[in-house]
Image (cartoon, grey):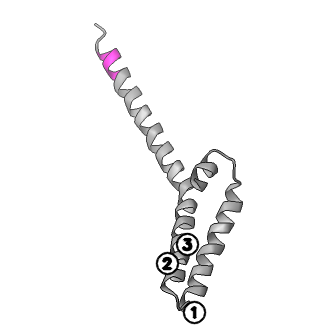
Amino acid sequence: MEGALLVFGAIDRWGALLVAVLVIAAYFVIRPRLQSPLGRDVLWTAAVSQALVALVPILVIVVGTVALIAVGIIAVVALIVLFGDRR
């Protein structure tokens, strides 16, 4: 859910990234001191979800770039077919 809000601009990108960094850092600092397996699992889940949220903007950029390249290739192929058919 947070990733979708980030993509659509409802959440500030830098704020979400800061929260993700803080949660992941807390995971590495607090985890060795936790005795409860449930606490470790909850902390791990929070850290992984924040890591995925941090990767959402990168994924959007990569998918957008691949889509633009694909459209460019299709346009070049269409032009080759159109100009190659002229006689």
**Residue position marked by numbered label 2 in the rendering:** 41
Q: Amino acid type of disc 3?
A: Ala
Q: Position of residue 60 (x, y in %)?
A: 53, 49
Identify which residue is drawn at 36% across, 22% down.
78
In which quarter of the view is residue 33 placed? bottom right
Can you say which quadrant of the picture contains the C terminus?
top left
Q: Amino acid type of disc 1?
A: Arg
Q: Position of residue 77 (x, y in %)?
A: 34, 26
Query: Which residues make up the magenta segment?
Result: 80-84
Identify which residue is drawn at 57% across, 53% down.
1
Sooner in the amino-acid sequence: mark 1 or mark 3: 1
Q: Relative to 33, is 63 above or below?
A: above
Mark 2 to mark 1 CA distance (whole Å): 13 Å
Q: Secondary structure at mark 2?
A: helix
Identify which residue is drawn at 48% across, 85% down.
37
- Whether the magenta-drawn stretch holds residue 82 is answered as yes
- Whether the magenta-drawn stretch holds residue 37 is answered as no
Q: Relative to 58, is 65 above or below?
A: above
**Residue position marked by numbered label 3 in the rendering:** 47
Q: Position of residue 26 (x, y in %)?
A: 62, 80
Which marked residue is nearer to the observer: mark 3 or mark 2?
A: 2
Q: Secondary structure at mark 3?
A: helix
| Secondary structure mostly taken by the magenta-highlighted segment of the chain | helix
**Residue position marked by numbered label 1 in the rendering:** 33
> In the visual, does 18 lie left or right of 67?
right
Q: Position of residue 70 (x, y in %)?
A: 40, 36
Which label is found at residue 20?
Answer: none
Q: Nearer the viewer, residue 61 or 2?
A: 2
Q: Amino acid type of disc 2?
A: Asp
Sooner in the amino-acid sequence: mark 2 or mark 1: 1
Mark 1 to mark 3 CA distance (whole Å): 16 Å
